[in-house]
Amino acid sequence: MSQNPPENDPLEVIDEAELPDAGEFSATDEPVSEQSSEPIDPIAALRAKASEWEDRAKRERAELENYRKRAAREKADGLRYANRNLLSDLIPIIDNFDMGLQAATKESEDSVIAQGMRMVFKQIQDFLESYGVKEVEAAGKAFDPNQHEAVSAIPSPEVPEGDVIQVLRKGYRLHDQLLRAATVIVSKGPEAATPAE
């Protein structure tokens, strides 16, 4: 006695007449693009895909190389300027030592104290130079707002207008970065003659 399968049975019996004939498909059929009915050359498609991946690999390699160079540059800069804060804090101490040296030299140029202070000051300057600290050139130079800080301008018949007459406080650079600007007085040039009454 044969039973009909239940209507909700997931395993439905499919009539073989509804299935497509196996001869309708073959392994040699070429893929057809969705936009047009022309067949796509599979080799050309693979070459295009390979070219796309090659371009992507080249871009990724260039980005990685740029990152490595940037990281190396940042590391070198970090080492080069690692002592910036320490050296900045040391500059006021050097100013005070320089003032003490000038006072000792005024009393007696050949005194033992002045000679000893000159030796210590030379050691300090050599130490700073070994770390890349250099004094900003100011006296007699043209005023440069990137390196100098002018506190006043006075007339001078000898010094051309815009040049530094006097340095009130030395400025310092660490390699190519400014640690402290030089405080200066700038010339206004010769004073204009007052018209006769």
Image: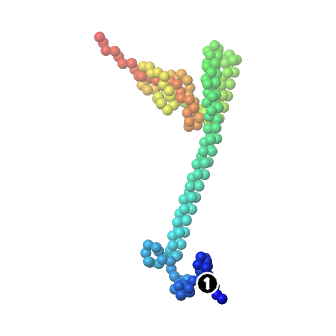
The residue at which mark 1 appears reads as 4
Most distant residue in the left direction: 197
- In percent of width and height, residue 59 lies at 54, 59
Looking at the image, which residue is at 47% across and 28% down?
Answer: 143
Residue 47 to residue 126: above or below: below
- In percent of width and height, residue 139 lies at 51, 25
Query: What colour scheme governs how the chains and residues are painted in the rendered image of this protein?
Result: rainbow
Of residues 98 and 29, the one drawn nearer to the viewer in this rendering: 29
Is residue 162 among the parts visible in the rendering?
A: yes
Give amino acid for label 1: Asn
Of residues 152 and 192, the one drawn nearer to the viewer in this rendering: 152
Can you tell which quarter of the image residue 101 is in? top right
Helix, strand or loop at disc 1? loop
Looking at the image, which residue is at 51% across and 82% down?
Answer: 29
Most distant residue in the front direction: 1
- In percent of width and height, residue 192 lies at 36, 18
Can you tell which quarter of the image residue 80 is in? top right
Looking at the image, which residue is at 56% across and 36% down?
Answer: 177
